[in-house]
Image (tube, rainbow, N blue to C red):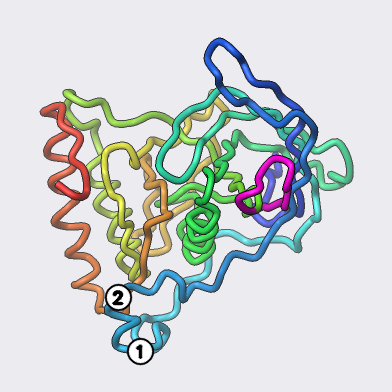
Amino acid sequence: MTEYLPINALSAVILVSGKVEPEEEEWIGPKVPIALYRQAPPPASILDDRYTREKHLNFSDFCPPYPDPPFELPPPAGLTLHVSLGKLLSEGRTGMIFECECTIPHGNKMGYKIPPVVIKIARQFHTKDISREATAYESMTCLQGSAIPRCYGFFQARLFDYFDFGPMSILIIEKLGGLLELGEPLPNGAESDLTDACSDLAHLRIHHGDLRWENILSVLVPNEGGLPGVPSPFTGKVYGWRLVDFDLATRTARDFPHAHSYYYNHLRRVLRCIPMGIAVQPWE
């Protein structure tokens, strides 16, 4: 049976050297190898919303304990992942997401297979956003592989020669599939999966903060190396769609109905507009 890389197996990432393509001015890697080391994300309290902060509420007093993940984590393996950057897949306010080729040249005594992953690199002055997203992923460990992608760690390096505005910060995240097609009917099961996935986040009192068409992706199909999904700890279902991009996520001490209403109202509008070819934005 294939043993895939656990989400806690990596202690470091080495970005191998790359170059800048002058015609497109597309950055595809550093000029020299860069070693980044795993960091503990900031505490979950940085996600507390205004209501929770202004009321001086202790989140754990108002939210039931989170369920254990539906998978077992072995002891950290202390492995170093060597990464070569590939195509730029997307870019946004806080970061750039690249395809990548990965190897573990040394120390992989368990023979872990590396699943398809992407690397999210923080933009200038957006290290805090990426570290916040790392906190969100860690807080939602029980949903990784079901409602959200697996996150293999938050890594940083202080590099004054290349990043004089702060540490270089990256996330290693499970590679997913494509977007829902604008102007086409929703695929069978998509609305049900996404409704339940959003309900899972509401059970954790997590507000996505940037729920829109661009942040909903299908799982990667097995013939492209996609990992099997794990059952939701709340519904027991294995979803075909996942939510991504959590740098604006918050958590609230309000009750489940309030947290769920955020998704119920906005998700319906997002999904209803997709067949009409409209990508609804959160501020609209």
Give the x, y percent position of residue 246: 41, 53
Q: Which residue is mark 1?
A: 56
Give the x, y percent position of residue 58: 40, 88
Give the x, y percent position of residue 264: 17, 57
Secondary structure of the residue carrying tag 2 is helix
Q: Is residue 242 above or below residue 42?
A: above
At a point 80% along the width and 38% down the height, the residue shown is 104
Amino acid type, callout 2? Arg
The answer to whether residue 116 is magenta is no
Judge left or right: residue 78 versus residue 216: right
Q: Which residue is mark 2?
A: 50
At a point 17% along the width and 52% down the height, the residue shown is 266
Q: Point out the stretch of residues depicted in magenta.
A: 155-166
At a point 28% along the width and 31% down the height, the residue shown is 180
Asked if residue 140 can be seen in this view, the reply is yes
Give the x, y percent position of residue 78: 81, 55
Magenta residues, dominant SS class: loop
At a point 71% along the width and 24% down the height, the residue shown is 18
Q: Is residue 24 above or below residue 139?
A: above
Amino acid type, callout 1? His
